[in-house]
Image (cartoon, rainbow, N blue to C red):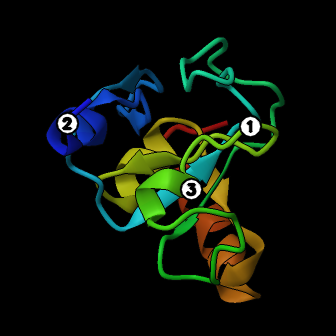
Amino acid sequence: MTTTQERSSLQNRVTPWGDLQVAQERGEWMGNRGILHDDDKKIESLWRHDHWVTCLISYGESRRKGETSREKLFTPGNYSELFFLDEAIAFAAGHRPCSMWGAVGPHRYAYEQPAAGIP
């Protein structure tokens, strides 16, 4: 498999409707719905739990094994990394702010979600 094929083969880009697609665009936000993939990196489920979170990609450092960040994606036994083009898409898809937002983020989200029609 070529590098270009590898880059575009994972079904981990989330649409505003919560669907998972194959796309090269990554954006600055990532999310988590649990372990959705099998050992061949194929999606088996759209979610494993209902605690869907989103966070900036730049937050924290990955400790997963692999030479490149690409090799660390969808590793066996670890959650499936999902990507959003922006924060609005993550929220529209049903993801909530992660804990790194501290005191400000969740409060802002709680204030804005009723205006957006989010239960």
**Between marks 1 and 2, how big is the CA–CA gap?**
21 Å
Q: Is residue 116 visible?
A: no
x%, y% of residue 69?
A: 46, 64
From what the image shows, is residue 57 above or below residue 118?
Answer: below
Position of 64 with respect to 86 (left or right) is right
Residue at x 37%, y 46% (from the top left corner)? 89
10 or 6, which is in the foreground? 6
From what the image shows, is residue 64 above or below residue 5?
Answer: below
Q: Which mark is residue 92?
A: none
Residue, far left:
4
Q: Which quadrant holds residue 50?
A: top right
Residue at x 74%, y 37% (from the top left corner)? 76
Q: Which residue is mark 2?
A: 2
Report helix, strand or loop for mark 1. Answer: loop
Quadrant the C terminus occupies: top right
Q: Which quadrant holds residue 55?
A: bottom right
> Which residue type does callout 1 highlight?
Pro
> Which residue type does callout 2 highlight?
Thr
Residue at x 63%, y 82% (from the top left corner)? 61
Cβ–Cβ under 8 Å for marks 1 and 3: no
Q: Which mark is residue 72?
A: 3
x%, y% of residue 95?
A: 60, 46
Mark 2 and mark 3 lie on one chain; the one further toward the N terminus is 2
Which is closer to the viewer, label 2 or label 3? 2
From what the image shows, is residue 19 above or below residue 82?
Answer: above
Q: Which mark is residue 76?
A: 1
Q: How many numbered markers are drawn?
A: 3
